[in-house]
Amino acid sequence: MGNEHPASSVADLLKTHALDLSQYEEVYKHIHANPELSLHEAGTASTIANHASLGAYTVHTALGGHGVAGVLTNGSGPTVLLRADMDALPVEERTNLEYASKTTFKDPQDGTTTAVMHACGHDMHVACLLAASEWLAREEVKRTWLGTLIVVFQPNEERGLQAGQTENVIADKAVLKIDIRSQHAGTRGKVLKAMRRIVTKECEASGCEKFPTFEQIRKFPLTVNDESVTNELNQTFTVVFGQAFDPNTVTSNASEDFSDLATSVDRPYCMWFFGGIDEGKWEKAVKAGRIAEDIPVNHSALFAPVIQPTMEIGVKALCAAALTHLGGVVS
Ligand SMILES: [Zn+2]
């Protein structure tokens, strides 16, 4: 069975069966106001697993902690997996939004309290994937595809950024947490060696009685999009989004475990970005040459995507991507 979902028919389907996103805006605000740190996403998981948008799916919970997955089998055909991450960060929100987080987390181990915030858009990813799940399961949409759709809400993406990380300097010992990002394995090796050299020599210079110890807490593989999957997506996104779509994504230094999901089962993958900054605000910052000063980036206490059109674009991209790779029904 060939792919019977050319880009134009995907775009048509999205137009003729528009989704009402108002209830997903509420889901977004709720998750934003109730953020949970990595490994503690129980409330978010329950919001997801009990949401009506997964009504047609077989839902699995408690995956790798608080992960949730929905599976929708619709005849025989390819399997497509869509993924959203769901954890928040130890950041104190300063956006002044009406749905801003006032949540804190008390570490049961050391008793410290940390403010928690969705400062990386995972709340938006969850809302978008729930909306896309509903749309792809609608009878009139479902009859256009064949295969198995898996939607994964992944916990624990922001590993290593747990509470207490800023209070790690204690009188008789020092714990340094260093996050190294590189685009080539060779560079990574060099930077790791240099880091060990500098720390060891600094310890010697200041007369430390104990040698420093080094421990690798986490490691992400490079994310390199599959060429053929990406080319097909480029065609669909170009038709669906027109000028708003940029196929030439710049290489990013973000750290991500997304590719593990696919490479662990030897399947191809594609990761894309979508923006969340108000257009007027962006234009103004560009004009004033103040992008770095005026546009809060991920992990900032001021990170605040505009709900629309961010959500609409996020949902459409997921729906279009799934239809591009699921089998089509010849009508
Ligand atoms: Zn992040």
Image: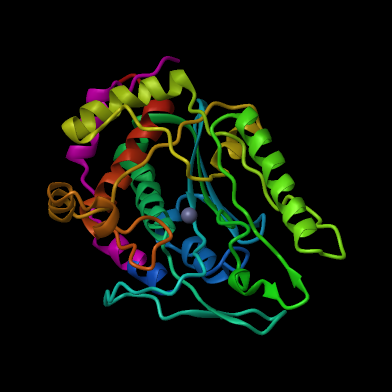
Answer with left or right where residue 15 lies relative to residue 254: left
Where's residue 151, x and y in %? 49, 46
The image quadrant of residue 118 is: bottom left
* Residue at point 30%, 72% (across, down): 95
**Image: 208 above or below 199:** below
Q: Nearer the viewer, residue 277 or 154?
A: 277
Residue 14 counted in the magenta span: yes
Residue 214 counted in the magenta span: no
Chosen colour scheme: rainbow
Answer with left or right where residue 241 lies relative to residue 127: left
Q: Main secondary structure of the magenta part?
A: helix
Where's residue 263, x and y in %? 62, 31
Report the span colored magenta: 1-28
Which residue occupies the extreme top position in the image? 2
Q: Nearer the viewer, residue 228 or 18?
A: 228
* Residue at point 63%, 36% (across, down): 188
Residue 250 visible in image: yes
Q: Nearer the viewer, residue 219 or 102?
A: 219
The image quadrant of residue 249 is: top left
**Image: 120 above or below 184:** below
**Image: 115 above or below 152:** below
Where's residue 42, x and y in %? 57, 69
Where's residue 312, x and y in %? 25, 49
* Residue at point 56%, 53% (across, down): 157
Q: How many marks?
A: 0
Answer with left or right where residue 200 lies relative to residue 252: right
Q: Nearer the viewer, residue 97 or 214?
A: 214
